Amino acid sequence: MNTEITSNIHYVGVNDRHKDIFEGLWPLPYGVSYNSYIINDEKIALVDTVEADFFPQYLDNIRQVIGDRQIDYIIVNHMEPDHSGSLALIKQYYPGARIVGNKKTFDMMRGYYHVGEDASEILEVKNGDTLSLGKHELQFVLIPMVHWPETMVTLDQTTHTLFAGDAFGCFGALNGAFVDSHMNCDIYWDEMRRYYSNIVGKYGVPVQQALKKLSGVQIDYICSTHGPVWHEYIERVMAEYNRLSLYNAEPGLVICYGSMYGNTERAAEVIARAASEAGVKNIVMHDVSRTNHSYILSDIFKYNAMVLGAPTYNNGLYPQMESLLSEIGGRNIKGRKLGIFGSCTWAGQAVKKIKEWNETTAKFELVGEPAEIKQSLSEETRKACEALGKAMAESIL
Ligand code: FEO
């Protein structure tokens, strides 16, 4: 089986089609891959590992490439356990391998696995340091907070291959091929935005700093830790990460609502209809109790406006909306327009709570007048919802 990507760089990663929810939070309808790579030179380097559950298959993948030879270096670009989980096991099979990482890498590694405690088994690198494997000349570039503080990338200057950690990654297992030019990539574009918005979305500024560090560097292959190896679509992938990390979005409206007995949902329908009649074509609607918030966040990273509405619950905000607000607020999203609506039976709190959240946390541009419904839509509150939908449309268009 040919696993070579280019000039003695081999794919040895695995597909996870078992896990339903990544990080216990994010659905995986297409699975996910944990990518790992071998640089098979005079010295052999393994770049990142995989989740420990997949170790037997992983070890077999490695042996298919290097046979009985020993690994000289294990490069750890990122310590999150989906990539570092096999470290302790791989060290048992390749005890002579030196682990390459930066100071923060080893602080985490000792805590997680009690590996790297002996100075002779590690090679600590700083930003810009290099390592020669023979023909392949590696350089390490620290890109903290993409996605953890210790994160770095490894650039093979010989083949212009970037081992990128989570950067440029996406959800979706690999179905046979691992290089983009050998596969249909259609599913990966939406899965990239969902991955970015769910996992990396908070760290727009560090992603921008990383992109600046890499600008001007010739890159022919991007070997991320999740999803396809990028070769044909490098420009598109870089542009998408640039857009997402700048929080740029296209005109469109995401309407998110909670509803217990359908009255708040009716209000959401009226708002959507009014926005549509006023000319907005990109409208998506999510019941916050039914759509996993993973997909809502992805749409909020896609479109530049949202309307949020929910019932009052226990003299506060409907819990599923409260949870969504926390998830949106935790991502430092910028440049969005916001409309608000809410409902109650006897004492309204929902509109007030969403407004407070926006003033203290999200700081989005408030559009139109919030629409507050008591019990069910009346002639007056229907008009308020229509006015909100129209105002959103005027703001978007
Ligand atoms: Fe795929 Fe941040 O780990």
Image (cartoon, helix red, strand yellow):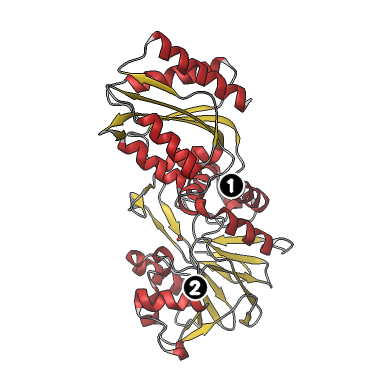
Q: CA distance from mark 1 to mark 2?
A: 26 Å
Q: Can you identify the residue that label 1 sits on?
A: 244
For residue 230, above or below residue 296: below
Sequence-wise first label, 1 or 2: 2
Q: Nearer the viewer, residue 305 or 347?
A: 347
* Res. 281 visible in picture: no
* Helix, strand or loop under label 1: helix
In the image: residue 205, left or right of residue 172: right
Q: Badge 2 local density, few (<14 within 10 Å), some, or many (20+)?
A: many
Amino acid type at image mark 2: Val
Q: Residue furthest left?
A: 314
* Res. 325 visible in picture: yes
Q: Nearer the viewer, residue 89 or 386?
A: 386
Q: Position of residue 172 (x, y in %)?
A: 46, 49
Q: Position of residue 366 (x, y in %)?
A: 54, 32
For residue 298, above or below residue 2: above
Q: Residue furthest top?
A: 379
Q: Can you identify the residue that label 2 sits on?
A: 76
Of tags 1 and 2, the one toward the viewer is 1
Name which residue lies at 44% across and 57% down.
33
Name which residue lies at 51% across and 21% down.
388
Q: Position of residue 223 (x, y in %)?
A: 57, 62
Q: How many marks?
A: 2
**In what quadrant of the picture does the C terminus appear?**
top right
Quarter of the image for residue 179 reads bottom right
